Amino acid sequence: MSQSRAKICGLKTPADVDAVAAAGAQYAGFNFFAKSPRAVDFDTARELCIHAPVGLAKVALVVDVDDAFLDALTDAVPLDMLQLHGHESPERVQEVRARYGLPVMKVLGIADADDLPAIDTYGDVADQLLLDAKPPKDAVLPGGNGLRFDWTLLADRKFWPRPWMLAGGLDPDNVAEAMQRTGATQVDVASAVESAPGQKDAELIRQFCANAGITSDPQA
């Protein structure tokens, strides 16, 4: 069994979920940031999570939301993990973990070496970390912009406080190189496996997972 793991984010249809499962990915990401072309409402997400096969982890991407939003989300949608993709403080991460009893993945934007100390800071409070390219200052979306950061920033890092995932500009053509350069065993993708914004392509998902060293599920 491969040690590599992939998260395909921004799923919107049952066919998307089927494609992710068939490709052997371990995480299915559902986007609740309203401005994203990948955003889904609670009712849609609930149906997709129910449709997902056992063993496929269902992850909710949220951005700087309050407890009222998370209360409604977790009441409506059967989730396995919360992904905090905003400016949440370490204290906020702790609050969310304690209140909802779900693992929390904190997204950290990386542009240069000054951004790296946050890995240890948030590693003390999150269950997993996701390192993404820091969005441009004028960006509408906090992620999913198809941008990459300098992978050499991670090349010599020996200690990681938590399991971590690489994101930012990954695609079927460069994911193997990215993993080799950074040592990442978990990778995340959204826009690069789409035929149009918000429209997933099953073949690109399959290629991404295969090139990440993930064997597709022969039962799917």
Image (spheres, rainbow, N blue to C red):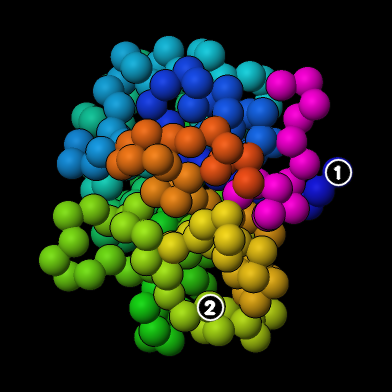
Name the spot of residue 154 as percent of width and height, x first.
57, 79
Type of residue at label 1?
Answer: Met
Q: Is residue 123 left or right of residue 176?
A: left
Question: In which quadrant of the rendered view does residue 36 lie?
Answer: top left
Q: Earlier in the sequence, mark 2 or mark 1?
A: 1
Q: Is residue 69 left or right of residue 77?
A: left
From the viewer's perspective, is residue 167 above or below residue 150?
A: above
Per the rendered image, the range of residues in magenta is 208-220
Mark drawn on residue 1: 1
Q: Residue at x 65, y 86 (%)?
A: 156
Type of the residue with mark 2: Trp
Quick one: label 2, few (<14), some, or many (20+) residues within 10 Å?
A: some
Looking at the picture, tell me which residue is in the foreground, 214 or 119.
214
Per the image, label 1 sits on a secondary structure element best described as loop
Q: Viewer-proximal residue, 143 or 119?
A: 143
Q: State whether residue 192 appears in this view.
A: yes
Inter-mark Cα distance, 2 to 1: 26 Å
Residue 85 on image: x %, y %: 34, 52
- Residue under circle 2? 151
Residue 178 inside the magenta-drawn segment: no
* Residue ID at (53%, 25%): 17
**Residue 139 vertical position relative to residue 219 in the rendered view, above or below:** below
| Picture disc at residue 196 | none
- The answer to which image quadrant residue 42 occupies is top left
Horizontal arrangement in the rendering, residue 34 relative to residue 193 (left or right): left
Local SS, label 2:
helix
**Residue 121 picture location, percent across and down:** 45, 70
